[in-house]
Image (cartoon, helix red, strand yellow):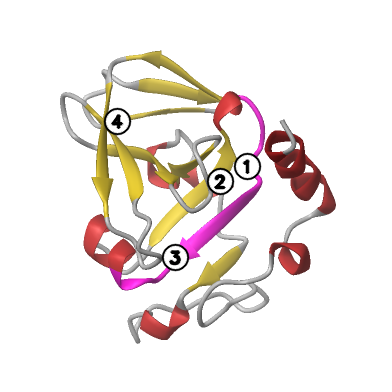
Amino acid sequence: MNGSCSCEKCKFEILNKPLIVHGCHCENCQRQSGSSHSQNAMIEKNNVKLLSGQIEPILVSTGSGQGQIVCRCKDCKIALWSVYNIVGPDFYYIRVGTLEKPELFPPDVHIFLSSKVSWFQIPEGVPRFEKMYDRKQIWHQSALNRMRAILDK
């Protein structure tokens, strides 16, 4: 699956399916995305290939206090992915809206509902949490194995 920024100078490819897709409703994601929530596909850094363009990393705050590095197109400044310092540099959180077919990546889970805007409706059957969740309870075993393989290196 390919993705790009608005000016299409930054193009990238994801080489595997995401570990998980989050719909995050925290106040930071609302403010930073300018929307009701952010939708991020978590994937290993080694499964993302920058095909063209230059990335500009910008450190912004997070609720954990450890911050995240938002990687933006150097030209149009569109956010392509983030690196959350609490998780580490080996994982990217791809902005689903930058992918060619974002409809293929609906949220697997909605998080930080304690600050969700009242009018946003979460589909029935999708796991939801007031804050964060325990990966072992939500992720598929194959995704847990992929994460463990990176962390064990």
- Residue at image location 66% in from the left, 46% down from the top: 19
- Residue at image location 29% in from the left, 30% down from the top: 5
Residue receiving disc 3: 24
The part of the image, by quadrant, that contains residue 104 is top right
The part of the image, by quadrant, that contains residue 78 is top left
- Name the side, left or right, on which 20 lies relative to 74: right
**Badge 2 amino acid:** Met
Of the two numbered discs 1 and 4 on the same chain, state the one appearing first in sequence: 4
CB contact under 8 Å: marks 1 and 4 = no
**Badge 1 amino acid:** Pro
Of the two numbered discs 1 and 3 on the same chain, state the one appearing first in sequence: 1
Of the two numbered discs 2 and 3 on the same chain, state the one appearing first in sequence: 3
Label 3 neighbour load within 10 Å: few <14, some 14-19, many 20+: many
- Name the side, left or right, on which 13 lies relative to 141: left
Mark sitting on residue 48 = none
**What segment carries the magenta color?**
15-27
Q: Residue furthest right?
A: 141
Q: CA distance from mark 1 to mark 3?
A: 16 Å
Residue sitting nearer the eye, 110 or 125 = 110
Residue receiving disc 4: 5
**Badge 4 amino acid:** Cys
- Residue at image location 79% in from the left, 55% down from the top: 140
CB contact under 8 Å: marks 4 and 2 = no
Label 1 neighbour load within 10 Å: few <14, some 14-19, many 20+: some
Residue receiving disc 2: 42
The part of the image, by quadrant, that contains residue 138 is bottom right
**Badge 3 amino acid:** Cys
